[in-house]
Image: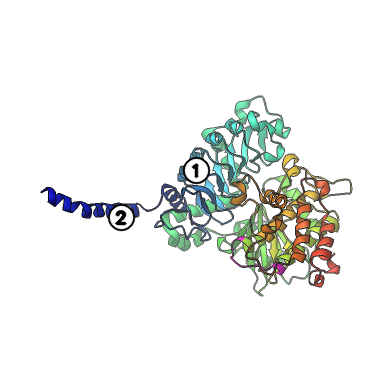
Amino acid sequence: MAFFLKSLQKPLQVYILLLCCLISICHGLTADGEALVNFRTSIINSDDVLGQWRPEDPDPCGWKGVTCDPTKRVISLNVSNHKLKGPLSPDIGKLDQLKFLDLHHNNFYGAVPPELGNCTELQGLFMQNNYLSGFIPTGLGNLSNLQTLDVSSNSLDGSIPASIGNLRNLVNFNVSSNFLAGPIPTVGVLGQFGSDSFVGNSDLCGEQINKLCKDDVGSQQPTGSQNVKKNSGRLLISASATVGALLLVALMCFWGCFLYKKLGKNDVKGLAKDVIGGASIVMFHGDLPYSSKDIIKKLETLNEEHIIGVGGFGTVYKLAMDDGNIFALKRIMKLNEGFDRFFERELAILGSIKHKYLVNLRGYCNSPTSKLLLYDYLPGGNLDEVLHENGNQLDWDARLKIIMGAAKGLAYLHHDCSPRIIHRDIKASNILLDGNLEARVSDFGLAKLLEDEESHITTIVAGTFGYLAPEYMQSGRATEKTDVYSFGVLMLEVVSRKRPTDALFIEKGLNIVGWLNQLVTEGRQHEIIDGDCEGVGPETLDPLLSVAIQCVSSSPEDRPTMHKVVKTLESDVMTPCPSDFYDSSSD
């Protein structure tokens, strides 16, 4: 008997080993992977960026947008700028080793998951430019390592949690352009942030924004259902497009894509509701053979299927006329009377501007609920898509051509417009490309106009994190030199093919400018160049990097003017073939 058992020992060990392997295989994804799968499941619509997230993988570390540490724990999730639509799964709070979460510029809606308070390793949390609503979770005050918190340009309401003041490492904080209400707490680090962190919340008050609070504190800090009721009416009025979109999403959730396509067309009128009753067309150039009736008739046919982009200030539609001409239509909601007056004044000026390296504003439709701006359509899309999403390779000459065009467009705004224009939101997605990769600067519709020689600054805060000059983030004071800094960041993004807030930088406490400074200190500045870029020549690389380094100087006085940038690029970078890029009639 003993001999028999001994003879079975070795095969039994083999069987146990095989069984363990089988159990391991059946176990499938890691816990972090399962949390990400649940995150993906809640996404109703996307541009297929999550298509390669396969539940049968052993871990999520090879998935697009996901970065892991050596132990296969997820430490970074970056799915920004991918048109993701849906609520945020609370399972995201299970990623307890997450250091960097970037969800900005999508179409997420619903509440900010309170479970995010479990991600105590978080250093950067970027959720701006979505449709998130409800309260800012008080549990975010548990994120003791957090350095950046940006939930701007959403539909959040309620008060700012005093617990945020506990975040001693918080350097960048932005809750602007929401529906927040009540006194801004001054406890802890919250007392150190200026008005640029809170602008665009009309019901906030406090010393940070130089607005006195009423004595009746209770009336300023509505909570629970009372606050929801207070803001729901305003949301229905000021963001009717968002509410309509969420209703469509609900249909998709309950009835599926088929029923949405089948029934949605009967219920949704697209932009028809914007142009019914009192809409008027204003055209700035007389070279278009369309009557107001022709344009309004086409506007009534536009719906979600025609959306080609969502920017910080509105949704962009593709508008095709019967004769084959194509335009881009930007829909901007009217928020208040002051907003409308500002646009009337600005559009009158912008309509007179026509330049080779600027996107041409053809006219606009003034409806009771929105402004519909009509621009020339550029088939090359925006630079952000070309650099980071489409997978197309740009050689060195193409990148220089794009940089040169963007520089000349911005120089025109700074030096040749009357009044001069500060863009305030120079970034890759605001550089559009035609079919020949010629660059055009777009979306300067909300730039502060300098009325005269004495007015050199504005305190209206705009811009996108990663592109903002340090003095602008601190003071909210924009000048031409803050635009120059953003352009320098854009140059680095073009040559490196990395976003300004790439996870590689954030994890080291840097951005693309910090990375450049580190490389320069170590004499390795050439390593910033995209390794897949062909045709890079040292005779153009060194002077180009020299210009970029000057543009992103921490001292505004040390930055060149855009006029100087253009001249230096033409003489030191574009020579031997400046004729391809120089157009004396447009300067």
Question: Taking 481 as reference, is 138 above or below it?
Answer: above
Q: Who is closer to the viewer here, 530 or 159? A: 530
Report which quarter residue 411 is drawn in. bottom right
Magenta includes 41? Answer: no
Dot 2 lies on which element?
helix
Q: Which residue is mark 1?
A: 97
- Residue at image mark 2: 22
Q: Nearer the viewer, residue 546 or 92?
A: 546
Report if residue 395 lies within the magenta region: yes
Residue at horizontal 64 percent and vertical 25 percent from the top: 216
Q: Is 255 placed left or right of 363 in the picture?
A: left
Cβ atoms at labels 2 and 1 below 8 Å apart: no
What is the spatial separation of the Cα atoms under label 2 and label 1, in whole angstroms? 28 Å
- SS assignment at label 1: loop
Q: Magenta segment range?
A: 388-397
Q: Is residue 28 visible?
A: yes
